[in-house]
Image (cartoon, helix red, strand yellow):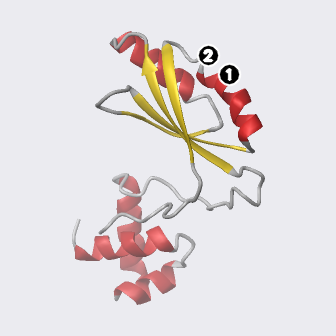
């Protein structure tokens, strides 16, 4: 990956719908060369996909929460069962295994606090191996979906 590839990635992170012609103009390559580089970046999985960013508040998902999850046993089998099950929960936007005082950090989005209470009881606490959770409700989203610092 060279400087030009990084330029392509930087532009696409901010403007995923840019045309190949405009992208080529911005980075100073021909459209054919730009298209070939883009195909290679996709093939090499440096670009993993394209998606629309939606406004969760306008769509009725106003509450963002982070939840620390502590499992009852830290075994490979428990980790695998938890990871598989949490992957099926549509409210879960992200889930990360972490080092420290708990096992997983879950980022979830729901309609409101009543919906979160329902999600906590019916989904999170029902996940395999969950012993304890701690929830942090987001009061203000300061910086979201930042591009990688290429």
Count residues near mark 2 (Cα–Cα under 10 Å), then give few for <14, some for 14-19, many for 20+.
few
Which residue appears at 75% of the width and 45% of the height? 111
Nearest the camera: 86 or 136? 136
Which residue appears at 59% of the width and 54% of the height? 139
Left/right of residue 63 with respect to residue 146 in the rendered view = right
- Of label 1 and label 2, which has the lower sequence position? 1
Quadrant of image for the N terminus:
bottom left
Quadrant of image for the C terminus:
bottom left
The extreme left residue here reads 2
Residue 77 point in image, percent of width and height: 39, 11
Count residues near mark 1 (Cα–Cα under 10 Å), then give few for <14, some for 14-19, many for 20+.
few
Left/right of residue 54 with respect to residue 26 in the rendered view = right
Can you tell which quarter of the image residue 2 is in? bottom left
Which residue appears at 60% of the width and 19% of the height? 125
Residue 1: which numbered mark, if any?
none
Q: How far apart are the two marked residues, 1 and 2, measured between alpha carbons?
A: 7 Å
Which residue appears at 42% of the width and 73% of the height? 35
Assess whether mark 2 and mark 1 are in contact (beta carbons under 8 angstroms): yes
Label 1 sits on residue: 121
- The secondary structure type at the circle numbered 1 is helix
Label 2 sits on residue: 126
Residue 53 point in image, percent of width and height: 62, 61
Relative to residue 143, is residue 102 depicted above or below? Answer: above
Can you tell which quarter of the image residue 113 is in? top right
């Amino acid at each position: 990956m060279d400087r030009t590839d990084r330029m392509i990635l930087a532009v696409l992170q901010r403007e995923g719908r840019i045309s190949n012609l405009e992208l080529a103009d911005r980075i100073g390559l021909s459209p054919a060369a730009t298209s070939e580089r883009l195909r290679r970046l996709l093939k090499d999985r440096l670009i993993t996909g394209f998606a629309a960013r939606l406004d969760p508040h306008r769509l009725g998902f106003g509450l963002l929460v982070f939840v620390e999850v502590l499992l009852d046993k830290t075994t490979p089998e428990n980790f695998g069962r938890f990871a598989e099950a949490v992957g099926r929960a549509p409210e879960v936007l992200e889930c990360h295994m972490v080092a420290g005082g708990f096992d997983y950090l879950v980022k979830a989005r729901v309609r409101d606090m009543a919906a979160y209470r329902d999600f906590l009881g019916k989904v999170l606490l029902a996940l395999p191996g969950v012993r304890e959770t701690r929830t942090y409700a987001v009061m203000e989203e300061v910086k979201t979906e930042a591009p990688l610092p290429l």
